[in-house]
Amino acid sequence: MIFTKDSTFLNLVRGEREHENYGVTHTIKHVFVDEKEKNLLLGCYKFDCRVCGNTKLRRVLSLGYQPLANNLLKTKDEKCELYPLEVNYCDNCFNCQLSVAVDPKKMFNNYLYTSSTSKTFRNHFINAANKYIKELKLKAKKSYIIDVGSNDGIALKPFKDLGFKNILGIEPAKNLSKLANKNKIKTYNGFLTKKNIKKIKKNADLILASNVFAHSDNLKEMAQCMLNLLSKKGTIIIEVQYLLRTLKDLTFDNIYHEHYNYWSLTSLNNFFKQFDAKIYKAEEVNTHGGSIRVFIKKGKNIKVEGSVKKILIDEEKYGIKKFKTYQDFGKKVYDIRKNVIKKINDIKKRGDKIIGYGSPAKATTALNFFGISDELEFVIEDNKLKQGKFIPGVKIPIQDKSKIQDNNNTMLVLAWNFFKEIKSKNSHLSKKIINIKDLEK
């Protein structure tokens, strides 16, 4: 049986039996979960930890039934599937993962998020490329670089601009791989699977997986594929949202169905112990409100740098191995909802129009969890692929900034990780620009 956080359980005795007053049938049938929903849940519920296989997982947080965050609606009346958005914790290997694993084809075959829209991200990957070239002694004419989940080619473009010709993106979204190929960044359209790597050249000197190592239910296959594509002395660099920062900073809206897994260095370390590979270096980076970057090489006798030990110690001190840490996080998230709803209502009472800015996945999670819909006039979005669509669940329209007639409004920045960039570019559009994070306190 599957129960969400607010489920009510009724123990009912089946009434198909002889009774002297009522005959054989004397019960009224009540359908609590219809067949479609039952099959949907049973088809995607994740009972076991994808790191260690433990089946005794514990609930950290439930954000209710939510739509697929990046599956924007084409019309306001379009229906969308809802799935439980719940985080479970494994007290065996300290992994955190969603309670359901939605079919990735539903989320990634046609993807509307383009990394290159943000100048902050473009600069991030330019700096990263220069860093990797220097530290790993990569050569433009010789080195072979693969980017897994390459989006529109943002991470490979800096290498291309520096003269690297032997580069390859692997991207499951048809529209994004087409866009990258159009921009002369060679991209293979497909998921990274054992079947598909037969079509991909091996012996990569560097394999990147930026903000993608949480996006797979079958992480063991993904990791094995990367190791199979890697040269003997090559390096894998994984960059992923950092669980410790999520817990500390209460960035619960970074939880959505595309992110099957939520990584600490502790859980990443436990995961890679299964393979002939080792994390030898780790560092924190500022993307997505706080991420961790790990460097991996093949072999067991790899020298591990002090950065790994330091972060592991810091995580244990914070309580990454204690379930109470996660329970406290869950309670604080519910307090956040109360605070935001109250402050939104206060703004509306003043007679202000509220306009949202940014429609990232985190906005879908937050708005649906808060129950905010009609309170926002519309949401402004710079990504043209999203304009004219609607945020799923709450059905708020997404518009170009030309829709704003005057600055007599309060602008609520939903893409809070780009708040400074958004505020500096759009101060003329609103008399008051607020970071949604400031309403949570």
Image: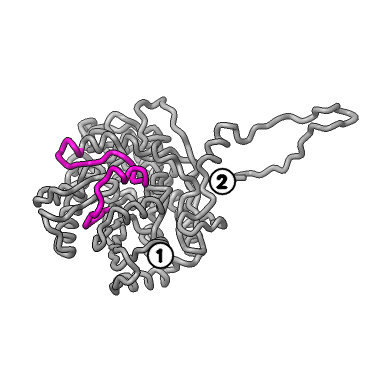
Q: Quadrant of residue 76?
A: top left
Answer left or right for 362 relative to 5: left
Q: Residue under circle 1?
A: 273
**Along the line of sight, which residue is nearer the eye, 361 or 40?**
40
Residue 93 appears left or right of 213: right
Q: Which residues are magenta?
A: 180-208
The image position of residue 342, as x and y in percent, is: 43, 47
Residue 373 lies, in percent from the top left, at 40, 36
What number is the disc on residue 212?
none
- Label 2: which residue? 4
Q: Residues within 10 Å of mark 2 (few under 14, many from 20)?
A: some
Q: Quadrant of residue 227?
A: bottom left
Amino acid at dot 1: Lys
Which of pointers 1 and 2 indicates the residue nearer the eye? 1
- Circle nearer the N terminus (1, 2): 2
Would residue 432 be visible to someone looking at this image? no
